[in-house]
Amino acid sequence: MDYPAFKQFDYSQSIAFARGLVDDLNFSYVSRWKKANPSARVIGFLPIYIPREIIHAAGMLPVGLFGAGDRIPVVRGDAFFQSYICHLPRTVVELLLNGNLDEFDGFIFPSICDVIRNMSGIFMLQSKNRYIRYLDFPQNFDEQIGGVFYRSELERLMEDLQKLNNSGIDTQRLNISIDLYNKNRKLLKHLQDFRAAHPHKMSAVDYYLIRRAGNIMSVEDFNDLLESLLESVKNVEADEEDKIRVVVTGSFCEQPPLGLIKTIENAGCYIVDDDFQLGLGWMKKDTPSDTSDPVNALVQAYLQDSIRSSAVYDSENEKGDQLAEKVKHLNADGVIFCAPSFCDPALLDRPHLERAMDRHHIRHFSFQYHENLGQFHVIKEQAGTFADMIKLWE
Amino acid sequence: MDVQKENSMVKQKQMLAEHFMELSQVRETGKKVAYTFVPGNLTELIYAFDMLPVYPEINSLQSGMRQKSRDYIREAEEAGYSEDVCSYVKCDIGMMLQGNIGPTGQQLPPPDILLLSYTGCFVFMKWFENLKQFYPDAEIAMLHIPYQESGKIEAGAIEYVKQQLRNEVIPKFEKVSGKKFDADKLAEKMDLSASAEDLLVEVFDSARHKPSPIDAYFGGVYYIGPIFTAFRGSESCVEYYRELLNEVNYRVEKKLGPITPDGILENERFRLVVEGPPNWTHFRNFWQIFYEMGAVFVGSTYTRVGGIYDEGFRHSSQDPLRSMAEYCMGCYTNRNLPQRIDLLETFITRYHADGFLVNSIKSCNSFSAGQLVMMRELEERLEIPVGFIETDLVDPRYYSYSNIKNRLDSFFQMLDQRRPVKSAG
Ligand code: SF4
Ligand code: SF4
């Protein structure tokens, strides 16, 4: 796309660009993309993960919808959801009703919770002439059972998308898309590794903005941006501070406000890993991009290489071990359970994840937030005390 | 009180007492215990393996009715469960932490198998993932039921559920029970279920009459529904519904209203359809508010979470696995929002309801998310007064009599005002 030369961006230009994208509730990037690709379609998707490769191979732009935080007054959204339902759906519906999503041709709702699920029905009623799809991911990981089902779901999705723009998804295009997303995950992994080693060189907020922007941009643009950032971040001059290292978990859907991320870090905790934009790194490995059956490659990747999240069936609490391993691998000092209020998947996972941390002697504390939270002093105090305690214990 | 009514009442009490007695004796009898959920329950299959089902949701609601839930919920919250999550889960976990004493005062046996029928509610999955941590020796079988996102049951989804039944659920049942799967035994139970389903539909459909002989919400959950979930597939279940239907027919003939804890509803003033579960901690008080206003529920969606038979579906011995798959996918909360609205519209028109009420449950996203849109849609389509109240299932902290009463007073006023306008038109 005819866009700024990402490759020449220095660090602050990259971050400023990402911030601009994240702040822009009119999605002008999306409008510009559409102008440059007039026959193409834009598909919004809700957290956490969808196989974006398929959308891309259909010549469409997948755009993540992660709510609008405190950047939009909720006027009509509250008339759709009772006060004891989380906040994200309100701002998403507000965006829809305000016309901010007019450039979107369809929406995909992944099967992660009852709220997102029922929101697909609300969109069906409110947005009758657009493509609405609730995408059921298998909770059975047997190739012959869950695999066959997932393939049937993906094939149905592909048929629908083909109808939307009268253009087929062939093997070659899908392989190219798989390749681009493999590259994307690799670049993100490099950035994550760099940041885990040098968290003082890139603030948690900057790191967040880049990834959130990545869920709006085309994968080609995002890859260019990441490549230049991986170079420019090395030149950032910053001193390492005496902070503890924490892993933040539980925020994979409704997003914590930027102020909250900043508060945690300012209170003395480098966030060396988080699950804010979990879907970007859903696959632990590359998906083969040279097969004659790329749909099968995507299916197998989902069954075998996807990470364990709160939306995925896990009766043995592998998630707990996964989290403990991550803490050890990153040499982190503790875990912050940071979940949106009223979020069933995150909050119902918390007690047994906490118990798993106890078993592994990993320190932790927890709190809840709303995406539009404006006051952070309680969290500042909690995070500060947590950091002080850990420093004292060491 | 009516003699026929007493018959079914006595029978219900007996059946439940025997069931809990059997559960308390599993150590001696060696019977295996399957914990499972009401929506998408595989009662026929459980009984075909001679196992006994335990429904944690039912235990929770019973704890709510017995005023135990506050304590159980506090226990679970102290163990780290957020105030924000489903109170059924917390009540169940709290009960387990306090010794797992069931509704009859007897200790419930631990599960030999957790049958996680993930049907229409995401929380079920989290609930049993949690229970599995507390019962590490129990087997766990996941049965993932795809949502009716497109408004119909997709062919791929049926095959998926059948494959899970064949390759996941049945082999685990065989392992736990030590018995081979007996297709004939299952078929027999499926046929018995179908007979009970015919009778159940007739009972619910009696609400067409004026006055309605049943209360399809409070009565629906109190004496129409429970036997159905726990005993489907048995002779005694068919007998129970036959008895109940006789009583209902008698009431129709005599033009009697439903029996309530405060006596027979004599003067039916308002006929309502309701969406959402009831509150259990103040069940009687809640029911009384409607009774005093002469309001009767002629249709409810909560009584359809365990299956929808109104449209003709019946369990079938022809292709039992397919039939179970269709049953699970057809449960109320496994249907998309437009389908739920259509079903409500059918209830409202078929049962000549004067108004539509939502009882929005604080901790149940599966039901609650989208209810405000459903209300608006039905108001527009049918030009019918709609009312909205908020309670919780078993968390007594969220039952405010005065709030509910105030809102209902305005709702009833609205219904009253509508009456002359309608008749004039
Ligand atoms: S924040 Fe949690 S409950 Fe709300 S939509 Fe997201 S996953 Fe669902
Ligand atoms: S959220 Fe609702 S449907 Fe789900 S378990 Fe709780 S009460 Fe039942």
Image: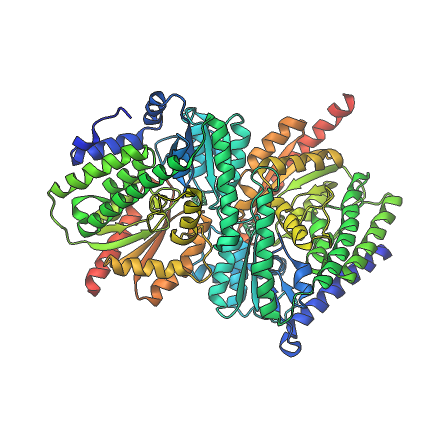
Residue B376, quarter of the rendered image? top right
What residue is at 85 percent from the left and 48 percent from the top?
B249
Residue B406, quarter of the rendered image? top right
What residue is at 53 percent from the left and 34 percent from the top?
A122
Q: How many marks?
A: 0
Can residue B181 be spotted in the picture?
yes
In what quadrant of the picture does the C terminus of chain B appear?
A: top right
Horizontal side, residue B138 vs residue A68: left or right: right
Hey, which residue is sitting farthest bottom in the picture? B28
Hey, which residue is sitting farthest front in the picture? A292
| For residue A320, above or below residue A47 | below
Horizontal side, residue A237 vs residue A220: left or right: left
Q: Find residue B231 and report its horizontal and vertical position in percent.
A: 71, 60
In what quadrant of the picture does the N terminus of chain B appear?
A: bottom right
Q: Find residue B102 and report its horizontal and vertical position in percent.
A: 61, 66
What residue is at 15 percent from the left and 54 percent from the top?
A242
Horizontal side, residue A300 vs residue B57: left or right: left
> How is the protein colored in the picture?
rainbow
Towards the viewer: A31 or B282: A31
Hey, which residue is sitting farthest right in the picture? B253
Ligand 1 sits in quadrant: top left
Towards the viewer: A11 or A335: A11
| For residue A180, above or below residue B287 | above
Towards the viewer: A141 or A277: A141
Q: Find residue B194 and report its horizontal and vertical position in percent.
A: 76, 52
Residue A183, quarter of the rendered image? top left
Can residue B362 be spotted in the picture?
no
Q: Find residue B32 and report its horizontal and vertical position in percent.
A: 62, 70
Horizontal side, residue A95 vs residue A118: left or right: left
